[in-house]
Image: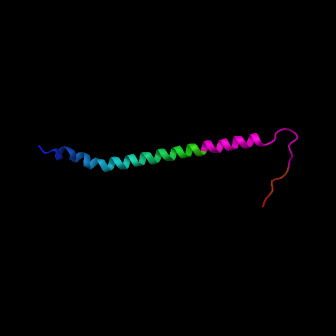
């Protein structure tokens, strides 16, 4: 029997599998970027809150516009 007969289904499914894997990698990369962006954003908020002075001696002023 010809070995090409056994390999035919793999040739058919190979492009579909590659597309599926590419989509999964893209989704994973996007999810990792969103998580990193969220973590970085909340870290910046936390650092900003720690830098701000607290207590009654804090000056109260209106925000300035350009």
Q: Residue furthest left?
A: 1
Q: Residue furthest right?
A: 57
Picture quarter with the N terminus = top left
| Residue 62 position in % (x across, y down) | 83, 52
Q: Residue at x 85, y 50 (%)?
A: 61
| Residue 38 position in % (x across, y down) | 60, 44
When asked about the image quadrant of residue 52, the answer is top right
Task: Tell me how the rendering is colored.
Answer: rainbow
Report the span colored magenta. Answer: 38-60
Task: State left or right for residue 41 relative to residue 16.
Answer: right
Task: State left or right for residue 35 relative to residue 51.
Answer: left
How many numbered marks, from 0 up?
A: 0
51 falls in the magenta region: yes
Q: Residue furthest bottom?
A: 66
| Residue 14 position in % (x across, y down) | 30, 48
Picture quarter with the C terminus = bottom right
48 falls in the magenta region: yes
Q: Residue at x 13, y 45 (%)?
A: 2
Q: Residue at x 51, y 44 (%)?
A: 31
| Residue 56 position in % (x across, y down) | 87, 39
Q: Please name the predominant secondary structure of the magenta segment in the image.
A: helix
Task: State left or right for residue 10 relative to residue 62.
Answer: left
Q: Residue at x 64, y 45 (%)?
A: 41
């Amino acid at each position: 029997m010809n070995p090409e007969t056994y390999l035919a289904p793999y040739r058919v499914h190979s492009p579909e599998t590659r597309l599926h894997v590419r989509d999964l990698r893209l989704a994973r990369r996007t999810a990792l970027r969103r998580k990193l962006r969220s973590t970085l954003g909340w870290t910046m908020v936390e650092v900003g809150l720690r830098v701000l002075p607290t207590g009654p001696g804090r000056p109260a002023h209106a925000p300035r516009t350009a």
